[in-house]
Amino acid sequence: MSRAEPLPPPLSIWIVNPFDDIPGEGLPPLRYWSLARVLAARGHDVTWWTATWSHRRKAARTPPLTIRDDENFAVRLVAVRPYTRNVSLARIGSHRDFGRTFERLASEGVASGQLERPDIILASLPPLEGPEAAARLAKRLDAVFVCDVMDAWPETFARILPGPAWFRRTIAPMLLSGMEKRRHSVLAAADAICAQSDTLLTCSIRPAAAATSPRPQHVCHLGAYLQEYPEPRRLSPTEIDSHDPAAAAAAPPLQCVYAGTLEAGQDLDALVAATRLLTSAGCSAEIHVAGTGALEGRLRAAAAAMNGSTRIVVHGLLPRAEYVKRLAESDVGLVLVKPETLVAVPYKACDYAAAGLAIVNSLPGELERLIADHAAGLTYKAGDAASLARAITAFAADRKLLDECRHGSRRLAEAVFDREKTYLQFAKWLESCT
């Protein structure tokens, strides 16, 4: 009979992130809730510092928080000003509030004895202000400072600057150089660096190379909870026989889903144009859109104007149970992300893989390699509607390919995105940084 692995000595661990949903705001747990839960279960004293303003809901958080006793970790709210737009001076001011007030509250709490001195402070980047404050606190309190890189910040701002591409390339270095220097300083100060993708870790280690010695590093993808989704069923020989005209005619429409924000960084114009091409070719498919954003109205108008064999159904932001049901009833998951967003492996890709959906992907690099390694889907060229239509048609016309990619996608989730495994590994790595 094997013995259970002994738990490590208990540590005081602070998590600094103002963005993720906290307990009481919706399921499933995202990155920091998942990590806090695992760390607490391993006997650590965990405190999550977050903001009084919900980034996702654009609404105030007010105590008392709906935190269940079984979470066994603390959530501390840091007062910040509200903001309604992700790109705005108000958001910059809100992040400044977060860094300053967090540092003050933490310093006063430890000095007064109300808070235990942390052994580890893990702070997400972005924003810059949280990890900057965390780095200063860690130095004063003799704690280990870990920077968790979640986004290419501030490079991602370059794509939303006004004007033509040549103009943005010209002014971006001047406007963003200050933020880049601050990021460099944060990464150089970190005792350890982790990231939500190999791509982000590589980009982060390079500017931090000025450190005197190599630092511990780790990748934990955003991931998904596989138990939320049933495994994809195997299609019968009749369902996958593309040479049987009767079987092909009886096949239901291919069920595709796009989940996520409806903003300029998503390839939505290509989706609308591809839908028209699919209809012209007589392809039978339904494309379900689950999400909201500034472009939702425009997409709804385009969907309403379409008639034919392929249609777009815009659902808006779905409750979690309905979202899971929509993915479980789908065949194909669409990653319609423009490469200039600098996203490597988005949440939607993890959810699609967990649900066993064949993936149609626009992102070159890390996600493209993962999909190829596990035979989980097809790639199309972002901005190219014909390329997107060809990928969807391939799955509609070849149900054997669809079946193989669906099971390859689930294998990808089991190997790389299973939070039950990956966040335990994340927690163990964090413990080893002390």
Image: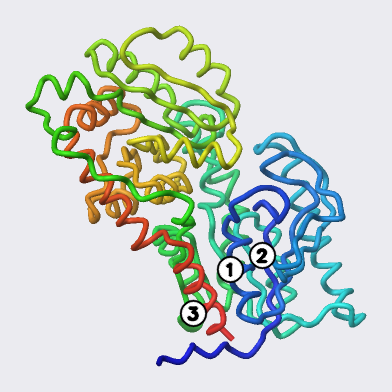
Residue 317 quadrant = top right
- The reply to whether callout 1 and callout 2 are in contact (CB within 8 Å) is yes
Vertical placement of residue 190 versus 91, above or below: below
x%, y% of residue 206?
Answer: 43, 66
Q: Do the residues labelled 1 and 3 touch (CB within 8 Å)?
A: no
Left or right: 53, with 348 as reference point: right
Quadrant housing the N terminus: bottom left
| Observer-nearest of 430 and 190 | 430
- The foreground one among 240 and 130 is 240
Residue at mark 3? 215
Residue 384, compared with residue 322, is above or below; it is above
In-front residue for pair 126/207: 126
Q: Mark 1 points at which residue?
A: 147
For disc 2, the marked residue is: 131
First-in-chain label (1 vs 3): 1
Label 3 SS: loop
Determine which quarter of the picture holds residue 243: top left
Query: What amino acid is labelled 2 in the image?
Result: Pro
In the rendered image, residue 326, in percent from the top left (x then y), is placed at: 46, 35
Q: In this view, does 36 lie to the left or right of 413?
A: right
Q: In terms of secondary structure, where does tag 2 sit?
A: helix
**Amino acid beneath label 3:** Arg
Question: Depth check: 415 or 69 in front?
Answer: 69
Question: Residue 259 location in percent, x, y?
Answer: 48, 36
Local crowd size for mark 1, using a 10 Å CA cut-off: few (<14), some (14–19), many (≥20): many
Q: How far apart are marks 2 and 3 (CA)?
A: 17 Å
